Amino acid sequence: MADKPLPWFRFYSEIAADRKILKIARVCNMSRLEVVGIWSLIMCAANDSPVRGTLQITLQERYTVDDLSDLLGMSKDQTEKLLSVFIQLEMIEVVNDVYQVKNWNKRQFTSDNSTDRVRKHRQEGILKRSGNVTETHSDTDNILQITDTDTDTESMNLFNLYSKYIGEIPGLYVADEIDLYERECPKDFFVPAFDELNKKSGIRNKWQYVKAILDDWRKNGKKDIVGKEEIKPKHRAIIDPVTGNQKLVEVSNA
């Protein structure tokens, strides 16, 4: 199934001094500015492809050397030479006769589509209509009730829980964090963590509180934290300068 196209993609500033870009400029007798411009056009084409990261005009028609020559405004010979260098330096690869940007999924995060995901989940009311998650109200709490079948439903999705119990995701950084915790933590932690949040009142930063619970459970095992004071996260998400991926690192509370 084709990915829904986004009108933008991530373009990292490190490209200005990237050794691969410098080598391509030297090998192909081009300026660094020309190579960066060419690479940005290729990235644009890959982003607009029906399957993001690949160079396809439609699902049935892939980019040929002639098509890329037209895109880049270069001769066919220049384009072929440039492609060979991109492939040699592992910036482009050929899979099933289709050119694609290597490591696209590592540099373009799943959470970049999070706004659409949250909006879709909110509109469909998944948490209320799934039949597996209900809300109960009492004088002291607002606790999610989980059935045995709940572990395999979208109600366990952190994006759903955040949008329902905290609100609109404020930006890509938080969306990336949600995506990272969703991948790093056991899914059966999510609803209980929000249960713990709902037992407390006056929490200033609810997402920080949920992260702290998830960090604690990842390290020490899931447990009841009722009665504890607000705690600070033990981990935070950072961008690895080498791979460009997000990872969790320990935070010093000293």
Image (tube, rainbow, N blue to C red):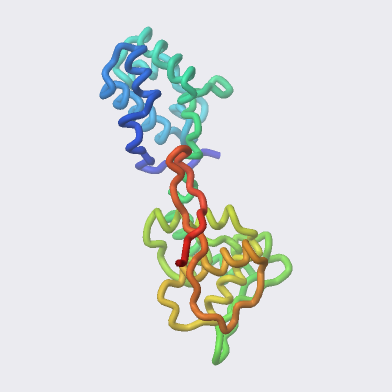
Q: Nearer the viewer, residue 250 or 217?
A: 250
- Quarter of the picture holding the C terminus: bottom left
Which residue corresponds to the image point at 60% horizontal and 69% vertical from the top-left? 191
Q: Nearer the viewer, residue 138 or 225?
A: 225
Vertical comparison of 87 with 165: above or below:
above
Which residue corresponds to the image point at 44% horizontal and 33% vertical from the top-left? 49
Vertical comparison of 173 with 34: above or below:
below
> In the displayed image of the protein, which residue is found farthest to the right?
148
Vertical comparison of 228 with 25: above or below:
below
* Left or right of residue 212: residue 116: left
Q: Nearer the viewer, residue 236 or 77?
A: 236
- Quarter of the picture holding the N terminus: top right
Let me know if residue 10 appears in the view: yes
Q: Quadrant of residue 188?
A: bottom right
Q: Quadrant of residue 142?
A: bottom right
> In the displayed image of the protein, which residue is found farthest to the bottom?
139
* Numbered circles on residues, count: 0
Residue 52 location in percent, x, y? 47, 36
Which residue corresponds to the image point at 51% horizontal and 23% vertical from the top-left? 93
Let me know if residue 4 appears in the view: no
> In the displayed image of the protein, which residue is found farthest to the front?
254
> In the displayed image of the protein, which residue is found farthest to the top?
77
Which residue corresponds to the image point at 56% horizontal and 69% vertical from the top-left? 213
Residue 181 location in percent, x, y? 54, 57
Residue 100 location in percent, x, y? 49, 27
